[in-house]
Amino acid sequence: MKARDFFAGRRLVIATKHGKETLIGPKVASQLGVLPFVCLELDTDLLGTFSGEVERKEDPLATARKKCELAMSYSGVDLAIASEGSFGAHPTYYFLPGNEELIMLLDKRHGLEIVGRKLSAETNFSSRHCSREAELLEFAREANFPSHGLILRERRGAIDTVCKGICEQQELLATFRMFLARSGQAFVETDMRAMYNPMRMKVIGEATDELLKRVQVQCEKCNSPGFGIRAVQPGMPCSLCGRPTRSPQARVYGCVKCGFSKTEKICDKDAEDPMYCDYCNP
């Protein structure tokens, strides 16, 4: 049984209210043979919003799983897909913002939970206080407005004065002037919802591609799709002092169904250069 045979011909609910189906739908339909659709009754904003009205209470993985479960409950199908994004400082390029997208395929019929991830520094995630129109327009230009939407509010963190999905300069300036007259400033930020942010949508597409690659890899023991990396083992020993370094030495691959796993060395070398050792090169 090939990986595609697990899913072909089945209805797949895409758990979104932000237009992600326009990107995810064609990809999963062509690669898995599923029949994708959106559940209009599902409000994913109840699990958290980027603009802060609803705090996300769980981590991205748990939130994506909850989206899938809710979508299946509402729609009556046993196959769902959902994504969840996170934004903040990039873990490698410390002075740049980062966008990490996680996408989950949840199959209740076969007991499968398959995840794809993508981390990217290609994001316009940003915000600032503005007290002059010139500052606002400079921010808008840097944020790729109007192809990318903006959010305005009276001050950072205010949830009672949030104006989202602004994609026209006339609306942007009118809203800004309203806040300016009220408090002398406004807080502007990028709208990170997928339908207002093509840069983020691109990363979601890349995460979906990673998911579909993993789906195609089947477990050598039980034949279930989704066999892939579960962890990376750090600790390659230093060639000078022998102490473990932070450099990875092996990858652990595992099955999402039966739990079978195997460990493979990342490269041929057995020791790391002392320049990467915290003891020899503190």
Image (cartoon, helix red, strand yellow):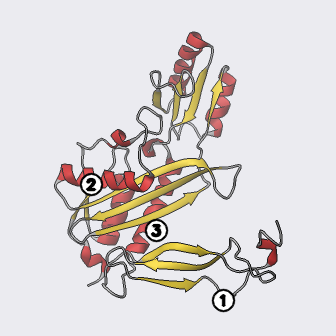
Distance from disc 1 to disc 2, alpha carbons, whole Å, reads: 43 Å
Judging by the rendered image, the residue that carries numbered circle 2 is 69
Above or below 16: residue 107: below
Q: In the visual, does 43 lie left or right of 97?
A: left
| Mark closer to the chain start, 3 or 2 | 2
Viewer-nearest residue: 160 or 278: 278
> Which element carries disc 2, helix, strand or loop?
helix
Distance from disc 3 to disc 1, alpha carbons, whole Å, reads: 26 Å
Q: Is the residue under label 1 in contact with that under label 3 (CB below 8 Å)?
A: no
Percent from the top left, x then y, of residue 76? 16, 55
Distance from disc 3 to disc 2, alpha carbons, whole Å, reads: 22 Å
Tag of residue 268 = 1
Above or below 1: residue 119: above
| Amino acid type shown at disc 1 | Asp
Viewer-nearest residue: 139 or 234: 234
Viewer-nearest residue: 116 or 230: 230
Residue at x 46%, y 26% (from the top left corner): 159
